[in-house]
């Protein structure tokens, strides 16, 4: 295992939180992901379904978790189903979980082979009134491939069509959004690895390097520090590319006097970090770049202070928009006429600040979280304002990851990652 073992008390807590939200005499199913094909005999690297990992800590395919609630005088039940390894499988793929090691990882005592799943489901269904099925209901989801989870959902609903169907995802949206201290520590570890990568890149970047070379510097530092990979496709965007929000080609040569925007994050134990920094390729910001940078940094700092328990996600963005509008006026990117002509649906700031301010962060980079529910203590959010000026050939975005506190400013998990102009210029020019 690349990361330190996670105490299974975390997964026990997570299962308990879900069970408490279920109706009595109900059953819930959670599936692992498929090994997704590329072509011929090639598959993409396996990525565990984050809901299953959240509940079990298991990183293995062909795995199913069952949670079952009973009547008032009976305890709830947990069952884990895993693949039964054989000699050929172990020879080709290495060791697999067995009931003992699966218990050690998950804290689940009742571990069965996946071959026994149908028989066990038939047995459990005798006392079940409701079936909780899990679907991807993330507000940004765009899934074109039928998943293992969806195939299972179709099968279970057809076979047990007399049972009442309920949704697991609304429960997960709420409980996954509020992080346990152990989860925050894992995100903090991912942020620490990201910091190491950024400090390395500050020494590397200069005119003539290629965007993909910068990506490689991050990748090497991440893997060296026990991160499996980038938490998401890295954005290394120099010059005009920095005005493209999700530019991931990373194939342009960095030129003198341009900026390079780097939106990258390491994962650790499946938990994401998400950082954006924008730095001068020549080691010094020019006057205009510096002015825009200071405005973005000011908006980020003020946006962070506004993230308090009780504020709504949408309202937070609109308040940040007001601060951004003031900065865009100072930069002479907007004028009074722009403000007079703006509408509630199309505020003036959207001309240069074209995306949201924040999103939940956790096991997914754009993590689960009910965006129609007020911000809560121990939510983890990104804060990432940006100003993009295609007509001037550059964009600047700055992004940190923060933990919401009960009272007071959020805790910045990236406070040690250089962001001030003076520090960035100093570190880039160290010999």
Image (spheres, helix red, strand yellow):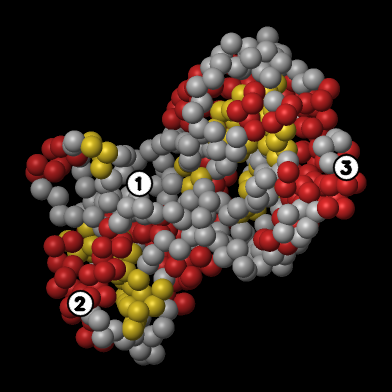
**Callout 2 crowding tier (Cα within 10 Å): few <14, some 14–19, many ≥20:** few
Neighbours of disc 1 within 10 Å: few (<14), some (14-19), many (20+): some
Q: Nearer the viewer, residue 161 or 57?
A: 161
Q: Secondary structure at mark 1?
A: loop
Residue 246 locus on image (x, y percent):
55, 38
Q: Which residue corresponds to the image point at 48% horizontal and 40% vertical from the top-left?
A: 232
Front position among marks 1 and 2: 2
Q: 289 above or below 39?
A: above
Of the pair 13 and 282, the residue shown nearer to us: 282
Locate residue 144, reporting x and y percent.
Answer: 36, 53
* Quarter assignment of residue 195: top right
Give the labeled residue for mark 2.
159
Q: Earlier in the sequence, mark 2 or mark 3?
A: 2
| Above-or-below relation of 431 to 216 | above
Distance between the alpha carbons at the discs numbered 2 and 3:
63 Å
Q: Secondary structure at mark 2?
A: helix
Tag 2 and tag 3, C-beta contact below 8 Å? no
Image quadrant in which the C terminus is located:
top right
Of labels 1 and 2, earlier in sequence is: 1
Q: Quadrant of the N terminus?
A: top left
The circle on residue 47 is: 1
At horizontal 74% and vertical 26% (from top left) the residue drawn is 392
Residue at 59% x, 11% y: name it. Answer: 208
Residue under circle 3? 335
Q: Residues within 10 Å of mark 3 (few under 14, many from 20)?
A: some
């Amino acid at each position: 295992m690349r990361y330190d073992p996670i105490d299974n008390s975390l997964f026990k807590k997570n299962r308990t939180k879900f069970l408490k939200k279920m109706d009595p005499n109900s059953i819930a199913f959670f599936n692992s992901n498929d090994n997704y094909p590329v072509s011929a005999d090639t598959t993409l690297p396996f990525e565990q379904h984050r809901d299953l990992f959240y509940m079990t800590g298991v990183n293995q395919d062909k795995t199913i978790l069952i949670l079952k609630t009973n009547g008032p005088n009976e305890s709830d039940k947990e069952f884990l189903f895993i693949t039964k390894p054989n000699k050929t499988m172990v020879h080709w793929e290495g060791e697999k979980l067995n009931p003992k090691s699966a218990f050690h990882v998950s804290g689940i005592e009742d571990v069965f082979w996946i071959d026994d799943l149908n028989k066990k489901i038939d047995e459990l269904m005798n006392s079940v009134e409701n079936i909780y099925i899990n679907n991807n209901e993330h507000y940004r989801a765009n899934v074109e491939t039928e998943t293992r989870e969806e195939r299972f959902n179709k099968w279970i609903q057809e076979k047990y069509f007399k049972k009442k169907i309920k949704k697991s995802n609304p429960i997960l949206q709420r409980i996954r959004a509020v992080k346990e201290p152990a989860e925050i520590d894992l995100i903090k570890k991912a942020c620490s690895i990201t910091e190491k990568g950024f400090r390395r890149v500050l020494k590397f970047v200069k005119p003539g390097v290629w965007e993909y070379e910068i990506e490689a510097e991050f990748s090497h530092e991440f893997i060296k520090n026990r991160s499996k990979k980038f938490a998401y496709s890295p954005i290394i965007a120099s010059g005009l590319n920095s005005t493209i929000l999700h530019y991931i080609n990373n194939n342009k040569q960095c030129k003198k006097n341009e900026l390079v925007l780097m939106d990258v994050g390491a994962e650790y134990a499946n938990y994401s970090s998400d950082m954006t920094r924008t730095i001068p390729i020549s080691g010094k910001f020019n006057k205009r770049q510096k002015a825009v940078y200071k405005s973005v940094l000011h908006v980020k700092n003020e946006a962070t202070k506004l993230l308090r328990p009780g504020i709504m996600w949408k309202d937070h963005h609109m308040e940040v928009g007001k601060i951004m509008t003031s900065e865009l006026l100072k930069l002479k990117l907007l004028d009074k006429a722009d403000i007079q002509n703006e509408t509630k649906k199309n505020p003036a700031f959207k001309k240069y600040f074209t995306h949201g301010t924040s999103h939940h962060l956790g096991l997914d980079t754009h993590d689960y979280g009910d965006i129609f529910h007020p911000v809560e203590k121990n939510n983890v959010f990104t804060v990432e304002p940006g100003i993009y000026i295609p007509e001037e050939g550059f964009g600047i975005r700055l992004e940190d990851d923060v933990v919401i506190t009960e009272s007071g400013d959020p805790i910045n998990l990236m406070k040690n990652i250089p962001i001030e102009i003076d520090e960035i210029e100093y570190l880039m020019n160290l010999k």
